[in-house]
Amino acid sequence: MRTRKKKWAAGELADNPMIIRDTADYKRQMRGNFANDNPVHLELGCGKGRFITEMSLAHPNVNFIAIERDPTILAAAARLAREKGAASIAFIVADVNDIQELINPGDVSRMYINFCDPWHRRKKQAKRRLTYDSYLIMYEKLLIPELYFKTDNRILFESSIECLSRRGWLMKNISLDLHNSLFEGNIMTEYEEKFKEHGPIYRLEACPPIGAVNPAAST
């Protein structure tokens, strides 16, 4: 679905200091952009920014990178963060497939994938899921030690577990109904808030196996 343009979005994209406009050399200057040595967490597909904003407010000693391919949606996310007084967030208009051009291996200590497109209508679409084998290989090459994943789509969740298992990732804190579990500290996305009453939310944490970044293991 095409996003409806907002009149204020262009101004937000141009003036919000948290939005990275020149990404050509961002890999080299990332630490300078944050001006500290705090750990960096990455969200793939930040939507309208509720999750990343609340995470920043709850964890001021963590730097956050929020990637969203739709400029108008990213503008909304950056505006929310600005209005809420969140800090240490770098918003970048980019496709997930381009993250290797934005961060160096070892830059990110945790990654969040929240309610990504399940691509469940056709079997051949499975390779487009952000937890498919080819994406896991990319995360391994970037030396990302932790992946936190949430979805409301059971097909996507089961497929993700299969892919993670196949690649040898170790999983923990697996929840088949997050909002009726004992898990504490969950921060919701806009989508999660809207649809949590329509069915269970699935969640897991995973880390790649030791030696996963060996080129021989990634072919």
Image: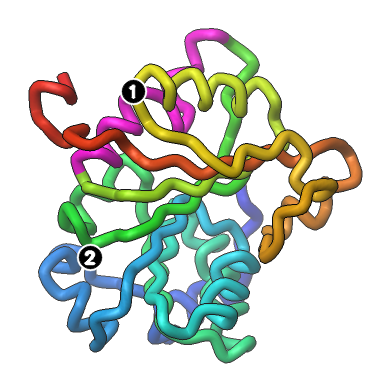
Q: Which of 217 and 16 lies nearest the eye of the viewer? A: 217
The residue that mark 2 highlights is 23
- Residue 126: x percent and y percent? 49, 18
Above or below for 178 versus 155: below
Tag 2: amino acid: Thr
Q: Is residue 184 left or right of residue 78?
A: right
Above or below, comparing residue 68 to residue 180 in the picture: below
List the single residue furthest toward the right. 197
Report the front residue among 46 and 153: 153
Classify residue 41 by image quadrant.
Answer: bottom left
Residue positioned 62% across, 19% down in the render:
120
Give the residue at x 24% y 81%. Answer: 37
The residue depicted at 58 percent of the width and 48 percent of the height is 114
Up-down relation of residue 14 to residue 164 (above or below)? below
Please give the residue where the numbered disc 1 appears in the rendered image. Answer: 167
Q: What secondary structure is the magenta-colored segment mainly?
A: helix
* Mark closer to the chain start, 1 or 2: 2
Q: Tag 1's secondary structure?
A: helix
Q: Are marks 1 and 2 in contact (CB under 8 Å)?
A: no
